[in-house]
Amino acid sequence: MAEEPDSLVLAMLRRMDDRLVRIDKNVDRVMEDMKDVKVRMTHVEEGLAGVNRRLDRLEVRVDRIEQRLELVDSPYGGVRE
């Protein structure tokens, strides 16, 4: 009978150890996935920054065109005549 409690405890410890190994593997997979997500987010942010730069350049060009065609309001509040 003295061996039974030891066997039960050892059996439970082995099951706990197996579960911890599975949990550890799952955490490793989640960490790898998070790294992938971070890399993808970086690419998205870089792409968005490029789009914003292009929009800024277009805005400058449109402003210049409007000024040359006198389509913009005067900086003094009145419309150009």
Image: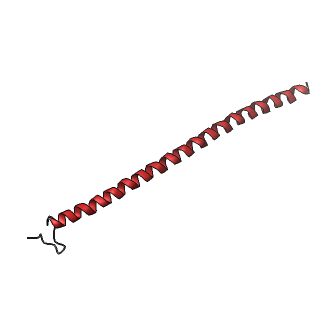
Image-based side of 57 in relation to 71, left or right: right
Residue at 22% across / 65% down in the picture?
64
Image-based side of 30 in relation to 8, left or right: left
- Give the answer, above or below, for where 5 lies relative to 41: above
User: Where residue 8 sits in the image (x, y, percent)?
Assistant: 82, 28
Image-based side of 40 in relation to 57, left or right: right
Q: Nearer the viewer, residue 58 or 1?
A: 58
User: Where residue 43 sits in the image (x, y, percent)?
Assistant: 46, 49
Question: Which residue in the rendered view is the most extreme toward the left?
Answer: 81
Q: Nearer the viewer, residue 19 or 48?
A: 48
Position of the N terminus by quadrant: top right
- Give the answer, above or below, for where 29 lies relative to 69: above
Residue at 48% across / 51% down in the picture?
42
What's the image's color scheme? secondary structure
Question: Which residue in the rendered view is the most extreme toward the bottom?
Answer: 76
User: Where residue 81 sits in the image (x, y, percent)?
Assistant: 8, 70
Q: Quadrant of residue 70?
A: bottom left
Q: Nearer the viewer, residue 32 or 5?
A: 32
User: Where residue 20 sits in the image (x, y, percent)?
Assistant: 71, 36
**Count of numbered badges drawn on the protein:** 0
Residue at 13% across / 72% down in the picture?
78
- Give the answer, above or below, for where 11 lies relative to 54: above
Q: Nearer the viewer, residue 22 or 48?
A: 48
Residue at 41% across / 51% down in the picture?
47
- Give the answer, above or below, for where 63 lies relative to 39: below
